[in-house]
Image: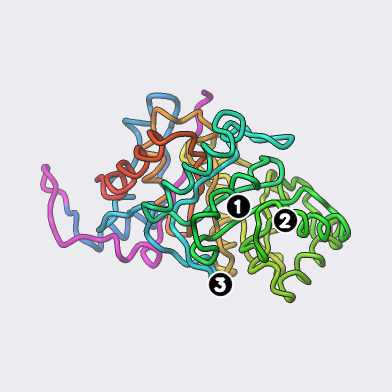
Amino acid sequence: MDETFLKLKYRSKQNSDRTVSHVTDADGADQSPNRKKMKRRKFLTYGLAGSALLSAFPYHLLAGSRKIYPHERVKLGNTGIEMSRMAMGTGTSGTAGSSNQTRQLGIKGLSDLLRAGFDDGINFWDSADAYGSHPHLREALKKIERDRVVILTKTTSRTYEGVKKDLERFRKEIGTDYLDIVLLHAVTDPQWNRNMSGAMEALSEAKEEGIIRARGISCHSLGALETAADEPWVEVDLARYNPAGASMDADVPTVRRVLERMKENGKGIIQMKVYGAGRLVRQKDECLEFHTGAGFIDAFTLGIENYEQLKDVQQRLPEASVRG
């Protein structure tokens, strides 16, 4: 992996709950709350590459004062939607209507996995037309009341008529009258808010009609992300973010600045590529603490392919969130 230099800025306002009482470290250095706040205001540079991530990671700057769990409820921006912090992702290597989850688990296997997460309090399901996972959600809903889960899906249609048809089809495939969150999927065009105005209009109408609860975008380029940060139409953004800059739209400091601006503009932010599309699976704890210590991310989605992976993140996240 190429070396990536990260500049991390943590503002005291965003992390006021992450301070500790006045103590000194083993060398007698001042570790008071004021000193910690000062450190969070600085730009700290770390060279992270492969195993170097373990020794260079700033645990002490990101450690929280309480444990954070995948099932805990969070509010998604200004949408009024509350759901579990973690979403059960169904799109690992997802494209052309299938994913690892749909290919390997089938309808029964994936629906059982979704219900297992739900039984543990994880009620946020991340799907997409491109993953082919709608029928699997439909099966899972046969044993769960619809209003007890939050469903996110995505459309690759870029026109008014295309999105209208997709919304009708999606609801039939999932077996629901409404969808909680619908995103324009994998957008790279920096001028998408002009060139996809018809698709935007269709989602706006759907919200007015109660077909969806929130609208937004999944960005796959820095230009698209920059536009989303300032576009009033966007209510939810699905953004690629991790400590090594793996499979992201730009380097970490650049993406961080855009996401901070996005958050200031009141948008809900859901993090994807938490493990860098699989490139950071040996640094899971660092990746999870990077999420909990960010201060501007509402939730994250993780592609879960089996029960072992589900249990793994359930055990890791709370410990990683307070690791100092």
Tell me if residue 62 is in the magenta stretch: no
The alpha-carbon separation of the residues under discs 3 and 2 comes to 28 Å
The alpha-carbon separation of the residues under discs 1 and 3 comes to 15 Å
User: At 48% across and 42% down in the image, what residue appears?
Assistant: 112
> Which residue lies under the disc numbered 1?
238
Residue type at tag 2: Lys
In this rendering, does residue 297 appear at all? no
Is the residue under label 2 in contact with that under label 3 (CB below 8 Å)?
no
Q: Which mark is residue 78?
A: 3
Q: Which mark is residue 172?
A: 2
User: At 30% across and 44% down in the image, what residue appears?
Assistant: 320
Q: Main secondary structure of the magenta part?
A: loop
From the image, which quarter does the C terminus lie in?
top left
Mark 1 / mark 3, whichever is N-terminal: 3
Question: Mark 1: which secondary structure?
Answer: strand
Image quadrant assignment for residue 89: top right
Question: 10 Å neighbourhood of mark 1: few (<14), some, or many (≥20)?
Answer: many
Mark 3 / mark 2, whichever is N-terminal: 3
